């Protein structure tokens, strides 16, 4: 923090920056008197300059963001755990984004079933339906742009059967 703060002051003191009082941001931890570390997000700006134009005082506004950082960490841990469970599944699991008409997530099982890596499937974007699904089966797929089938309920998991092309171009 000391190095970053000193660098920000040096930058503000550069001849071309004497009229510039832009905000700088720092995210860091400080130890509370009880020994626990808290996360802070500080916004700093030049408060005033001396007669030579050099920074005299800096105004810092610091917010305790410990709760937000801990919540983010918990969410990341939960997402990591859920992804491990999904990847351990012996079936293909995916999340389909209706807005973009593409896969938002697919587990690793896709590779063992179709021969495509997860990255290859995600890279297909909105072409995924035309590239993978048998043309006669697209109508079976709910909420796809090329299908008229709609989902009538919310918060449900759907199961349906259709033919999908593997990496060699064979429909299964």
Image (cartoon, rainbow, N blue to C red):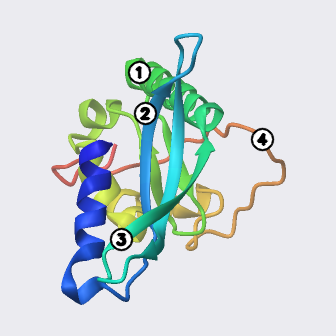
Specify the quadrant of the image occupied by residue 57. bottom left
Residue 43: percent from left, percent from top: 51, 59
Residue 125: percent from left, percent from top: 37, 65
Q: Judge left or right: residue 13 versus residue 82.
A: left
Question: What residue appears at the point 37 percent right and 89 percent down from the top-left corner?
Answer: 19
Question: What residue appears at the point 45 percent right and 54 percent down from the top-left corner?
Answer: 103
Q: Judge left or right: residue 143 versus residue 82.
A: right
Q: Is residue 29 above or below residue 85?
A: below
Q: Secondary structure at mark 2?
A: loop
Q: Residue furthest front?
A: 51
**Along the line of sight, which residue is nearer the eye, 106 or 139?**
106
Q: Is residue 108 above or below residue 138?
A: above
Residue 8: percent from left, percent from top: 30, 63
Q: How many marks?
A: 4
Structural distance between the alpha carbons of marks 2 and 3: 60 Å
State the mark number for residue 39: none
- To which residue does mark 3 refer? 55
Structural distance between the alpha carbons of marks 3 and 1: 51 Å
Structural distance between the alpha carbons of marks 3 and 4: 57 Å
């Amino acid at each position: 923090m000391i190095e970053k703060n000193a660098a920000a002051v040096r930058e503000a003191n550069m001849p071309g920056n004497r009229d510039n009082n832009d905000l700088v941001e720092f995210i860091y931890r400080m130890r509370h008197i009880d020994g626990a570390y808290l996360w802070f997000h500080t916004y700093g700006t030049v408060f005033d300059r001396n007669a030579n134009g050099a920074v005299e005082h800096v105004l810092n506004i610091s917010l305790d963001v410990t709760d937000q950082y801990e919540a983010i960490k918990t969410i990341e841990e939960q997402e990591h755990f859920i992804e491990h469970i999904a990847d351990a599944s012996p079936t293909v699991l995916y999340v389909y984004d209706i807005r973009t008409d593409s896969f938002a997530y697919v587990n690793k099982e896709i590779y063992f079933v179709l021969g495509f890596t997860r990255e290859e499937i995600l890279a297909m974007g909105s072409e995924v339906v035309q590239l993978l699904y048998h043309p006669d089966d697209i109508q079976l797929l709910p909420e796809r742009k090329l299908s008229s089938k709609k989902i009538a309920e919310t918060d449900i998991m759907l199961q349906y059967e259709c033919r999908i092309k593997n990496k060699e171009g064979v429909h299964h």
